Amino acid sequence: MSTNVSRGTRGSQLSLSAGVILCLVAVSLPFWGESSWMREFVEIACYFIFAMMWNLLAGYGGMVSVGQQAFFGLGGYAMLSMATFWGVNPFVAIPLAALAAALIALPVSRLAFRLHGGYFAIGTWVISEVFRLSIANIPAVGGGSGTSLTAMHGMDRWARESTTYWVALACVVASIALIYLFLRSKEGLALLAIRDNEVAAEGQGIAVFRMKLAVYVVAAFGCGLAGALYFVSSLRISPDAAFDVNWTAFAIFIVMIGGIGRIEGPIIGAVVFWALNKFFSDYGTWYLMGLGIIAIVMTLFFRQGAWGYLYKKLEFEVLPTQRKLRD
Amino acid sequence: MIETVVQGLLLGGLYCLFALGLSLMFGVMRLTNIAQGDLIVLGGFSAIVLAPLLGLNIWATCLVLLPLAYALGYFLQRGVLNRALDKDPLPSLVVTFGLAIVVQNGLLEVFSADPRSLASGGLNTQSLHIGEQFAVGILPLMICVAAVLCTCAMQLLFNKTALGRAFRAVSDDQEVAELMGLNARKLFAIATGIAFALIALAGFFQSLRTTVSPSDGPQLLLFAFESVIIGGMGSFWGTFVGAMVLGLTQQVGFKVDPAWGVWLGHLVFLAVLVARPNGLFPKTKG
């Protein structure tokens, strides 16, 4: 008897080709689109990458954090410091800043991992506040009122905006690919086993602690990437903006809308969030209350999210990670 | 020096009231209430609105506020939070986080961002003179006494009453407790009701002692959380001591530099986490 293990389906291959074509069209946008579209894309890209990382942590790693803005802010400040003090090109500094955030995550994890479940969530928030308050006391980066990214002065506006846009596009594609390949790898399988039952996974010889650490560091890298990208685009940084808990709030919203524990979830969620943000963000407090209520209702009644629902109905994945047996 | 210590301990009393509700809800049903801080602020604003509305003095207002808060907690648990309880902490975290956002922005919409306080009729300026140059504010002293009484009451409730025994039973093993005839969902609702009454009391005192503003919530949550963890989970006296340590640390920090108080409190919390991950007085029971 021979069995055939497969992951891809015809549908997934088709949608992957569609994605490639979409990317190629997107690359050419600066030559025919408006600059406001590029700015909008960069902003939503930051939310999206951040949400992907929150999904990886909470949906796959079982670690619910409300302090991921720590790495977002650190990424932003690392990029700014490299560009301002060492003269590194800000665009080159983006991946370096993400790397710096990942390095800082190593010692930080030792603190955060002492707490579990709900207390882990609030503990990460305290850690983020410590970074915020500490950076607010450093005059070299503007203290509490923040500072501007002066390294961009003198750069042509179109060149700056389109380069930022291309970098953002590359970051989005790279983080989808990174998470997709990670989840398809042997480590990804181990991660799913841990999510389903941590004790049983440990019993099967999976190094649970090391896996969780790896997820935490990868998520810090991604959040740092989003942060560095965001502040390259906005050109101004302050501790309150960089370490704002709303980053995590929006990420939770995006993930819960789209579907937690699925790669496609944050993609759908980010599109929904972009649309809501475009039409309703003028309503301020009412808008935020609406987002909060939607997140509550989704969690209580549609925990699998929009993509989980579609998947159940259609049995179709764009980026399949499950292995299926066929005879 | 002595003054700083006394001020710190009195501040700790307030933090203890912030933290008891969080400790109770986590102890009984492993529910981490991220909305804790915003609900404290809601309690403060409720007192500010109720006092002139009812035309009563502040203590009578407080007596009206507490049962209202209990009812809110009871029905919120029955209607919403019970559905979110799961082995996985995610649903309850997302729901209480969503609740925090709703409460915070609701308050912002109704009351704007300005800080307000409850008119105490001069109570917050009175002080008790001990010796020549030493004075303690009456109100902070009352808050601290209230914290001691509440901690005592919670510990007695858990150790000596049938309700406390039922709380401990559902906390230890919900399934077995339900087989023995306990109604876990109702017990959870009662626990949340009590926690909300404590939250309202904390908010009442906060608005009396200083000011409340809609954006204060997250910080109050962190103070409550740090008190619980420093003291060690699962014991109300642990929470009390944790709150004292936090209040003392912050007061020392404020003394050195006004910008350092909160920051130093966070650092001491992290230091305790490194040195004693289970808190100063770890105890899983009760």
Image: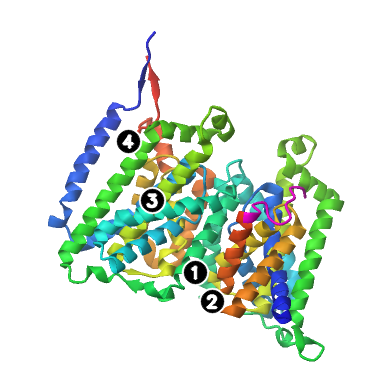
Residue at image position (21%, 44%) is A22
Element class at badge 4: loop
A286 vs B152, left or right, is left
Which residue position holds label 4? Answer: A318
Nearest the viewer among B242 and A258 is: B242
Which numbered tag is attached to residue A133?
1
> Residue A104 appears at what percent x and percent y?
44, 55
Which residue position holds label 2? Answer: B259
If the image is split into quadrants, where does the N terminus of chain B sit? bottom right
Which residue position holds label 3? Answer: A221
**Which segment did they paint magenta?**
B275-286
What is the CA distance from the residue labelled 2 to the residue labelled 4? 50 Å
User: The disc numbered 2 marks a residue on which chain?
Assistant: B
Given the image, on which type of amino acid does mark 3 rest? Answer: Phe
Which quadrant of the structure image shows residue A74?
Answer: bottom left
User: The disc numbered 4 marks a residue on which chain?
Assistant: A
Please say if B194 is above or below B202.
above
